[in-house]
Image (cartoon, grey):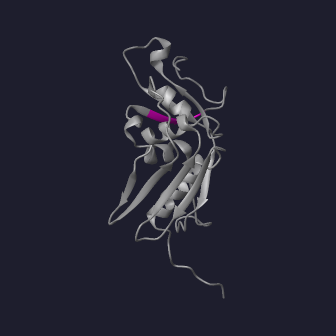
Amino acid sequence: MSEVRLKISPPWVVCVKKLEAMFDGDPQIAFNMNYTSEDPSVVIACNNGDKVAALLKILPTEYEFGNVTLKVIVDGTPSNIAFTNKKELFETAFKGNPVFCMAVSPVDDGYAWFSAVYVIFQNHVVQFFADNIADAFGVISTLYQDIASELLIGDGANGVYFCTNVEVGKLGKPLGEWP
């Protein structure tokens, strides 16, 4: 008889796994996690001052899960960079990260009436183990855009839309227009 495991991952552990999925491929970022329920925290270490400054703007200092608060510590010395726009902010935060495709701003294309920024991630299903009882393998399957929408909620992320890249030629445009 196999051993039955009835515990599920606490939400702060799943949150850290999502952060890891988003940033673990970045060669300039390292993680250190403390999973104790008394004082859970995640340290995101980076020695690139511009990237540290960007991360401090797009990540919150904590995530709340009922009576447990996960502290987010960006470890590194931020540069004095003054980001001129959110497109530049996200390009800096994700430079060298393989999950990031590009940031697009319609304002740059002459559409001043609409000032949103689109941050586009790889068209790839993200999977990680999380004791998910609704999945036969215990994993969560999601997209980078969903992780970003949930976790990149710092002040610098206001007015930013997270998207998944499309394969050229695979997606038709119903009326042949935008984008």
Q: Residue drawn 49% across and 41% down?
A: 55
Q: Which residues are magenta?
A: 161-165
Q: Residue at x 61, y 29 (%)?
A: 171
x and y percent of residue 47 in the render? 59, 43
What is the x, y in percent for residue 3?
62, 84
Q: Is residue 166 magenta?
A: no
Is 94 located above or below residue 137 in the figure?
A: above
| x and y, in percent, of residue 101 in the image | 61, 32
Residue at 40% in and 71% down: 38
Residue 78 vs residue 89, the one in the foreground: 78
Q: Based on the displayed image, in which of its 4 quarters is residue 99 positioned?
A: top right
Answer yes or no: is residue 93 visible.
no
Instruction: Please identify the residue farthest to the top as the structure is shown.
Output: 110
Examine the image and state in which quarter residue 37 appears. Answer: bottom left
**Quadrant of the image containing the N terminus:** bottom right
Is residue 91 among the parts visible in the rendering?
yes
> How would you classify the magenta stretch by its main secondary structure?
strand
The extreme bottom residue here reads 1
Res 170 quadrant in image: top right
Q: How many marks?
A: 0
| Residue 69 sits above or below residue 148 on the image | below
- In this rendered view, identify the residue nearer to me: 137 or 55: 55
**Direction left: furthest residue:** 67
Identify whether 86 is placed above or below 154: above
Q: State left or right for residue 67 relative to residue 43.
A: left
Q: Does residue 42 sit above or below 52 in this rendering?
A: below
Q: Position of residue 50 (x, y in %)?
A: 53, 34
Q: Residue at x 49, y 67 (%)?
A: 35
